[in-house]
Image (cartoon, grey):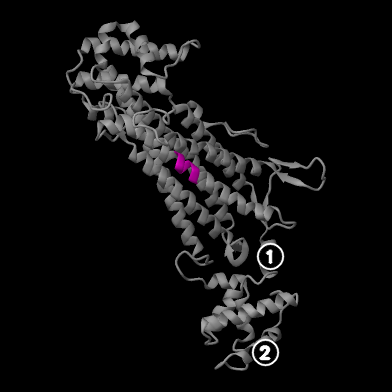
Amino acid sequence: MLGLHMGVLPASPFATLPDTEMWLQRINRASVVANVQAGLLPRELACRIREALDAMQQQAQDDPSYVRSDLYIQFEPKLLALCGKQASVLHVGRSSQDILATANAGMNRERILLFVDVLLSLLEALLRLAKREKNTIVPAYTNGVQAQPTLYSHYLLAHFQVFGRDLERLKACYERFSQCPMGSGVCNGSGWPLPTERMAQLLGFKTSAENAFDAGQCQGNDFPLEITQVLTAVMLHVNQFLADFMVQYAQARPWILYASQNGVYISSAMPQKRNPGLINDCRRDAGLVISAAQSAVLRMQNLPLGMPDVRDTQTLLTLFSDAATVVQTLTGILEAIQVDAARALEELNHEWTCTQELADTLTREGNLDFRRAHHFASTFVTWARHQGKTPENVTYEDLAAHWQQWVTTQEGLPSMFPLSTEMVRQALDPRRILEARQTRGSASLALIDDQLYTAWNRYEHWESWQEAQEVAQQMTWTTLEESLHDL
């Protein structure tokens, strides 16, 4: 479990999800319906089993001392005690192997859907912040160094793409593990003609298993391997965002601020110091999830097929819950971010971040080959830095004088600096640079609305998918109960 936060830990949405006991109920209820419909279970006995299952379910809700089952061999004796040994015919053709494989698969798919919902809130927060800061110009950094001007909205939309790929991985995982293991028996199927497709339908899976050995012995191990790597990716991307944020937070005059007192504390020794406790906690907790996730890989190392070492459902539940807490914390951080646009522009104009545009303009307007244009711009920046010059105080005459000195080392170039004062001004103007960006996906003031529109559409598509799966789940359980009580 995660450690204490400087702020309040978000309530885990996973606490109310159905557990193994509930899935054992669902599996037995679906077995009753499917077997009656297939002529494998007498209707009168089916009704007695149904009544016993109802009684067990009611006792589990009402009796605080009721011991919930983690294994089928714990569940079945309680059932038979209520409706007699004859009811054990329900277990013909089944095994605790395929039953627990089905329960685990069902629980894990429900956890994916809930985590997708948590991730959607983060994506929405990114889009809302991007919309608010749509035209805010800030420095972009590569290799940890200020590189080019960009739009903060464009930067946030990049993170939207990153977390969006994580969401697509979750969707793919959800769909990939939609084969129901029921009917696979221990590992080679069953001679009892169980209606496996009907069972899969009643339990909300797309289809029954293609291979009985895979369903009972392999699939249950592959899921932890896959989902832990997806959750690791999400946590790495959380820390990627926070690392960028902390570069600014550490500055004496940052252009991006965490505008909340929640999770910020004053140093016990240094009165001026404001420590970002919540952000540090979020980064640490993401690291804890990453560490815990790797245990699935280590437990699978040299593990014979069929061994259950990696399938522990409580371990996976804790991992999902902790990862969700990290994502929820980052969502709250995003909602408290403020950008000082004037300070960001000042940061840009204090450094030669627009120099590439000067080289491009020399190529486009001054008819230089790009390599020599790049070389001139680079040598000029070196000179300007030595002289304490910035784009704010450099003059056109400075550029022209440097050109006249530099061009003596070149062949075939004019002695006079080939750009006008206006061309230079536009080349060093961050806003003008972004106005001129044209290629698809650019940080362009003219294109950012389209990018936001596309991102919102994608978000709504993901949201609709998630809601559709939840509705389908609820309809599945409604149909199961109606079919059971219509016997």
Residue 229 on the magenta span: yes
Q: Which residue is mark 2?
A: 405
Residues 296 and 262: in front is 296
Amino acid type of disc 2? Answer: Gln
Residues 282 and 439: in front is 282
Q: Specify the quadrant that holds the N terminus.
A: top right
Q: Secondary structure at mark 2?
A: helix
Q: Is residue 389 visible?
A: no
Which numbered mark, 2 or 1, is in the foreground of this view? 2
Please provide the residue range marked out in magenta: 228-233
Residue drawn at the location 70% of the way across and 66% of the way down: 346
Residue drawn at the location 58% of the way across and 55% of the way down: 132
Residue 105 in picture, x, y percent from top left: 37, 31
Residue 380 in picture, x, y percent from top left: 66, 80
Q: Residues within 10 Å of mark 2 (few under 14, many from 20)?
A: few
Q: Is residue 183 above or below residue 127?
A: above
Q: Specify the quadrant that holds the C terminus.
A: top left
Q: Is residue 388 left or right of residue 188?
A: right
Q: Secondary structure at mark 1?
A: helix
